[in-house]
Image (spheres, grey):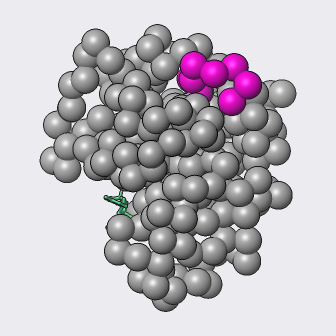
Amino acid sequence: MEIGIVGAGTVGSVLAKTFARGDNQVMLSRHSGAASLAPRRSEFANNVTFVEVETALQQPLVVIAVPFGQAPAVLQQVANYQQRIVVDVTNQFTADFKKIKTAPLTGSEVLAQAANNARVIKAFNTIPPDFMDGHVDGPGRRVLFYAGDDAAAKKEFAALVKPLNFRPVNLGKLRHGGSVMQVGGGLGNTHFVQIDE
Ligand SMILES: NC(=O)c1ccc[n+]([C@@H]2O[C@H](COP(=O)([O-])OP(=O)(O)OC[C@H]3O[C@@H](n4cnc5c(N)ncnc54)[C@H](OP(=O)(O)O)[C@@H]3O)[C@@H](O)[C@H]2O)c1
């Protein structure tokens, strides 16, 4: 699958490597531009290319790995996502780690409003970057909670992450599933959860 990632910081970089382990073409981008990633070429496999943000945003699956406060403006650069999948990995923090409140909407619902006609999935935000590669100690799979309002998109997402050693666990829709996944919802730092199947 073609996957565009916006944000090449800690999370975007790890997820680029994770998705590159599968049968995917990964397009990594950052605010500072594609050329600024060139010195990091040797970090990534050949199926990771460096692109501008606008190219990453055009892929069938787009991962938003920027600070929450930047995410709506990033997403609004596309007028119509035409039912493409947007994966929200954000946590609702300011730069100095103060919680950003969005109630009654969850953070993912705010992003879904900004991403016109996208099918938004919340995932990965409950585990630290070191565990976003899917590794586990011993046998089993890394549990990956996810939420979304579109059943078909969630099926596609689950099929994408399963071969990467994740055990996707569907928590329902962006309102309720998203609320337990987001900051203060109770599922933060769930990297200790792995499962023998
Ligand atoms: N780090 C964690 O432990 C963790 C865990 C789970 C979830 N998250 C969430 O994942 C997201 C990314 O976190 P991070 O730790 O990877 O942050 P980070 O290291 O600070 O990286 C942020 C990235 O976003 C890019 N960016 C910022 N504004 C942008 C814009 N307007 N357009 C395009 N790109 C933009 C930056 O581009 P430049 O590089 O060019 O500045 C940078 O590459 C955040 O929402 C965070 O809450 C983080």
* Residue 178 % position (x, y): 46, 21
* Residue 182 % position (x, y): 39, 26
Task: Report the residue at 33% width, 42% height from top.
Answer: 72
Is residue 155 in view from this perspective? yes
Task: Report the residue at 35% width, 74% height from top.
Answer: 32
Is residue 89 in view from this perspective? no
Q: Is residue 146 left or right of residue 142?
A: left
* Residue 120 % position (x, y): 54, 32
Q: Is residue 57 shown above or below 150?
A: below
Task: Report the residue at 76% width, 42% height from top.
Answer: 160
Which region is colored magenta? 145-153
Q: Is residue 151 magenta?
A: yes
Task: Report the residue at 68% width, 27% height from top.
Answer: 154
* Residue 173 % position (x, y): 54, 15
Q: Quadrant of the C terminus?
A: top right
147 and 141: which one is in front?
Answer: 147
Residue at the front extreme of this rendering: 79
Q: Is residue 169 magenta?
A: no
Q: Quadrant of ligand 1?
A: bottom left
13 and 68: which one is in front?
Answer: 68
